[in-house]
Amino acid sequence: MKRAILSDIHSNLEALEAVLADIDKQGIKEVFCLGDIVGYGPNPKECLEIAMGFDRVVLGNHDLGALFEPEDFNAVAEKAILWTRRQIEQGSQDTDFQETISQEEINTEANKRTLRWQFLAQLGRTHWEEDDLYLHASPYNPINDYVFPEDALYEGKMTKLFSLVKKRCFQGHTHVPGIFTEDHQFFRPTSDQHSFELKDQKYMINVGSVGQPRDGDPRACYVVLEGDRISYRRIEYPLNITQDKIFRVAELDNFLGERLVSGR
């Protein structure tokens, strides 16, 4: 059975919808998300409500920042997550809310708000499925630890990380797709639908980012797992729409929209 694994949506509704359309086109029914549903982007509520329907979701550092106080965030990210928190809390209309919609609609919005917070609050930091581990950042620190491609050169770090992996670890957080092997190599996907055959050894697999890629390719990225084959998918989406939304929100730095074009 095929499984779609995605990460780092970052409140980018247009990218998420494009990815889900591609998943649906392939007839894939099972979707796992590795965290950071929110942060940076302009549509946190909508992305959260979609993610509630996924088969499995783990907690990301921006999701945690929305729940509690953001830690170790730069000024741009912190301002964005505080704005995100306010969006999750409020209903669909920001002004004249009580006067413009019915009591039934008010109650519906209140229920949605409660469900959004409950959903975030119940997310676990890791998910084990037999010998496969699903998390946001790394086996050492599932929420905040970065594992960059160049870390493959550091034997000590890699040895420590792989000691915590039984077979395969699926992760995100860096927004850079690729596969780490136990013999300290990093393989980047080299095409739109690059596939890797996973052998009988340990792997750490970064699935890339749906909403804010940082590998120089602005297209949304996710992976499809089918048995021992992992396939990377790159999907175009109308990023100009996402950009315009970001530019209209004072609390979201223009840089967050500008970087979408370069994939950095």
Image: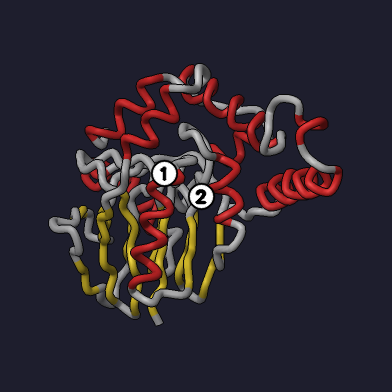
Residue tagged by mark 2? 35
Percent across and percent down for residue 149 are 25, 44
Q: Residue at x 56, y 68 (%)?
A: 55
The residue nearer to you, when weighing 151 against 133, is 133
- At mark 1, the secondary structure is loop
The amino acid type of the residue labelled 2 equals Gly
Horizontal side, residue 155 vs residue 174: left or right: left
Q: Determine which quarter of the picture holds residue 82.
A: top right
Horizontal side, residue 89 vs residue 249: left or right: right
Q: Is residue 184 positioned above or below 96 on the image?
A: below
Quote the CA–CA distance across marks 1 and 2: 8 Å
Please report contact status of discs 1 and 2: CB closer than 8 Å, yes or no.
yes
Horizontal side, residue 114 vs residue 73: left or right: right
Residue tagged by mark 1? 173
Q: Is residue 71 positioned above or below 177 on the image?
A: above
Q: Determine which quarter of the picture holds residue 193.
A: bottom left
Outermost residue toward the right? 103
Quarter the N terminus occupies: bottom left
The amino acid type of the residue labelled 1 equals His
Horizontal side, residue 198 vs residue 91: left or right: left
Percent across and percent down for residue 43 are 52, 39
Percent across and percent down for residue 17 are 42, 54
Near mark 1 (Cα within 10 A), the count class, few <14, some 14-19 or many ≥20, is many
